[in-house]
Image (spheres, rainbow, N blue to C red):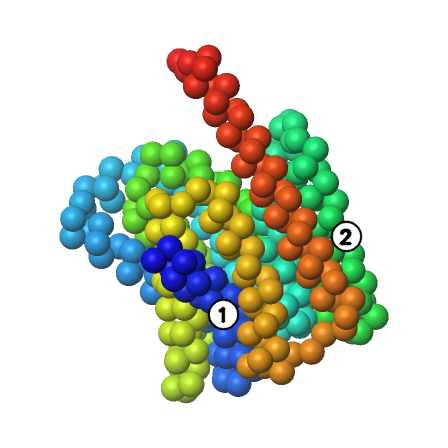
Amino acid sequence: MNLLISALGVLGVASSGPLIAGTLGATSVTALAIAFWRNAIAAVVMAVPVAVREPRQFTGITSREFGWSAVAAVALAFHFACFITALQLTSVAAATALVCLQSAWIAVFQLFRGTRHRWPVLLGLGIAFGGVVAITGFDMGSSTDALIGDVLALAGGALAGLYTLAGGKARQSMGTGTYTTLCYGMCAALVAVMALFSGQPLAGFDAGGWLGILAITVCAQLVGHTAFNHLLATMSPLVVSMIILLEIPGAAILAAIFLNETLPGGTYAGLALILVGLAVVVSGQRRGRARADRREAELGTD
């Protein structure tokens, strides 16, 4: 059963890039419309069970929880804006690989906060950076738009890392349903404001556009992320993190099949370097955290 759920999770998150690129290219749907409806629908879906079973969770949100949720929502809103726009400028494979660098960005943020990483984490960061150089180098030679798309995808990955860190702070005392409802809801509201100022419509699309939005929300948000949240209860976080990395080759394969996307050989080499580097980073981070947890258990906590 875990193997089936893992396959559904990978297929769900890997379909995000190709579905978004296909919807943007074939319909009048805008980038911010996808971000808005994806978060708005997910917020409603996550809110219903909590409202029915434990409605007091919404009235008991503290200022600290609200603050960290707001930080996460802002980071998530700009993450979607950067990533979805990047998919209009560069390849699906490159954008997905670069935005998946969020694990590496988290390690970098931790370095600035004084965390001393084990050598495998630093090695993995170096390998992943080599992949970034390979991808951006080939895109620099192809077009300016592709290079701008790469930069936006990199920014999207950094914002995803910030979203994860802020969400971790909020989740210390919040349930999953309460946090995701609040975060996704605030994210949708912020995206709506961004759409208003940028002149991007959030409605008035044809049937194909709405079908694309629904497919993105169901496949990537509800199926993909829900599958991995379920696996965290039955598998180790390290294994789940490694499985999620299959999104990178998965998105490249789906884009090649359904969007006829072809890339230079050097770009595929860059994808492989990022995949290997992230695997090393995730493995090193998890091992370091496990050792820290064991030391804490031995010494006791206040």
Residue of label 1 = 15
Residue 243 vs 139, above or below: the answer is above
Q: What is the x, y in percent for residue 156?
A: 59, 56
Quadrant where the N terminus is found in the figure: bottom left
Q: Is residue 284 visible?
A: yes
Q: Nearer the viewer, residue 234 or 281?
A: 234
Secondary-structure class at tag 1: loop
Q: What is the x, y in percent for residue 269?
A: 74, 62
Q: What is the x, y in percent for residue 243?
A: 51, 54
Callout 2 amino acid: Gly
Secondary-structure class at tag 2: helix
Which residue lies at the image location 21% right of the left edge and 54% below the top edge? 49
Callout 1 amino acid: Ser
Residue 268 vs 155, above or below: the answer is below
Quadrant where the C terminus is found in the figure: top left
Which residue lies at the image location 38% right of the left edge and 86% below the top edge? 207
Which residue lies at the image location 66% right of the left edge and 52% below the top edge? 276
Q: Residues within 10 Å of mark 1 (few under 14, many from 20)?
A: many
Which residue lies at the image location 57% right of the left edge and 68% below the top edge? 251
Q: Nearer the viewer, residue 211 or 70?
A: 211
Residue lying furthest right: 141
Q: Residues within 10 Å of mark 2 (few under 14, many from 20)?
A: some
Residue of label 2 = 130
Choose top left, top right, bottom left or bottom right for residue 221: bottom left
Q: Are marks 1 and 2 in contact (CB under 8 Å)?
A: no
Residue 241 shown left or right of residue 101 in the figure: left
Q: Nearer the viewer, residue 251 or 243?
A: 243
Residue 178 shown left or right of residue 165 in the figure: left
- Mark 1 and mark 2 lie on one chain; the one further toward the N terminus is 1
